[in-house]
Image: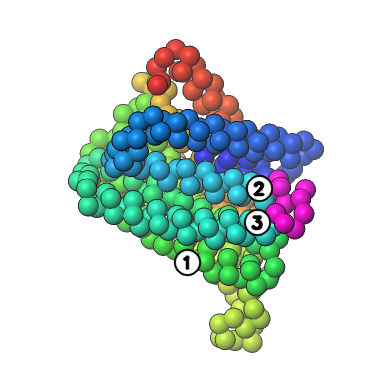
Amino acid sequence: MSTGAVAVVLGQTPNRFPGLDTIGTIFFILNLVLFVAITAVMITRFIMFPQKLSESLNHPIEGLFFGAAWVSISLILNGTQAYGVPNCGPWLVEALRVCFWMYCGAVMLVAIFQYYIFFQGERLQVKDAMPAWIFPMYPLLVVGPKAGALIQSQPQEAGYQMWAAAVMLQGLAWIVSIMIYAMYMQRLMTSELPSPPTRPGMYISVGPAGYTAAGLIVLGIRAPSVLPLNAFGISDIPDGQIVRALGILAGSFVIMFSVWFFFVSSVAIIAGIKDMTFTLNWWAFVFPNAGLTLAGIQLGSAYSSPGINGVCSALTLFLVTMWLITAAFHIKAIWQGTLL
């Protein structure tokens, strides 16, 4: 997720310079290699130990991360739009449209049945609530930004259909996320903070608001090009322009919630930094904050603001730096035997 997110951010970040597309392409190809390799290893695991598949999906912690695989697929599709479509024929545009609808159907099933598994078989305690409880819904949270990227190369009618689906699925994901946010806030107010090594996982709470804000703004920006002239029959003004203003306003309203969680999480991490050791939670330094960065990029584009664009360029540099640091610590941890 983190590698794919960096590739997507590099493809959209403002204040571009020669070679930036090459760096983004390297991250995109590396992400493909990692995804194929890790998927192959996991398939091998489940073939060798078939009972582990059911145990994994029903595990109260490991099972949550099934949604992460689908988020990775979404980011691959998003990256394919950024790095593949400009260099390929119209067949890729059609293929991405088919993949978009297949993805939406699959992740809707994931959101339904995985939460049902937890509702039916697990009794998780609110005092242990964590942002990862959102993970089965996370694949839907990234539908809006992905649709906003794909729509720009789609025919008008197909783009309109994708736009409408993205708005509805983004709304579902955001409302469920708000309910889980409430439980997480209750945990923070009534229980202890996570242990210092796992506190980077607090950044996961940045992602839902960030990706939702990014989705609302980019779908608003795309509305004039995909909505029919009088889609809702409410006025003589083109409906796309009305929706554009509403999308930008709604995204502006949501994005500060993501910023607030970013600073709360950062303060908690700094407070416990002396006791931090590497865990896989460190990858949350990158992926959730990429959602905030994408939201900022869309906001800067909507407002034509050099200041916001400058902040987004700094956040992009932060993401790449944290990816390199986390990757180095990850490799070191495997080499020293403290992981796996």
Name the residue located 61 percent from the left edge and 71 percent from the top edge.
Answer: 160
The residue nearer to you, when weighing 39 against 173, is 39
* Residue 249 colored in magenta in the image: no
Sequence order check, earlier mark of 2 and 3:
2
The residue nearer to you, when weighing 262 against 202, is 202
Q: What range of the chain is rendered magenta?
A: 82-92
Q: Element under label 2?
A: helix
User: From mark 3 to mark 1, how far is it between C-alphas?
Assistant: 22 Å
Residue wearing tag 3: 95
Residue 129: mark in rendering: none
| Disc 3 packing (10 Å; few <14; some 14–19; many ≥20) | few
| Residue 282 % position (x, y) | 45, 30
Name the residue located 68 percent from the left edge and 34 percent from the top edge.
Answer: 26
Instruction: From the image, give the main secondary structure of the stretch colored magenta.
Output: helix
Count of marks, rendered view = 3
Residue wearing tag 1: 168
Q: Element under label 1?
A: helix
| Residue 153 % position (x, y) | 70, 60
Between circles 2 and 3, the one closer to the viewer is 3
Amino acid marked by disc 2: Thr
| Residue 111 % position (x, y) | 38, 55
| Residue 118 % position (x, y) | 27, 49
Amino acid marked by disc 1: Met
User: From mark 2 to mark 3, how far is it between C-alphas?
Assistant: 11 Å
Amino acid marked by disc 3: Ala
Sequence order check, earlier mark of 3 and 1:
3
Q: Are marks 2 and 3 in contact (CB under 8 Å)?
A: no
Residue wearing tag 2: 80
| Disc 1 packing (10 Å; few <14; some 14–19; many ≥20) | some
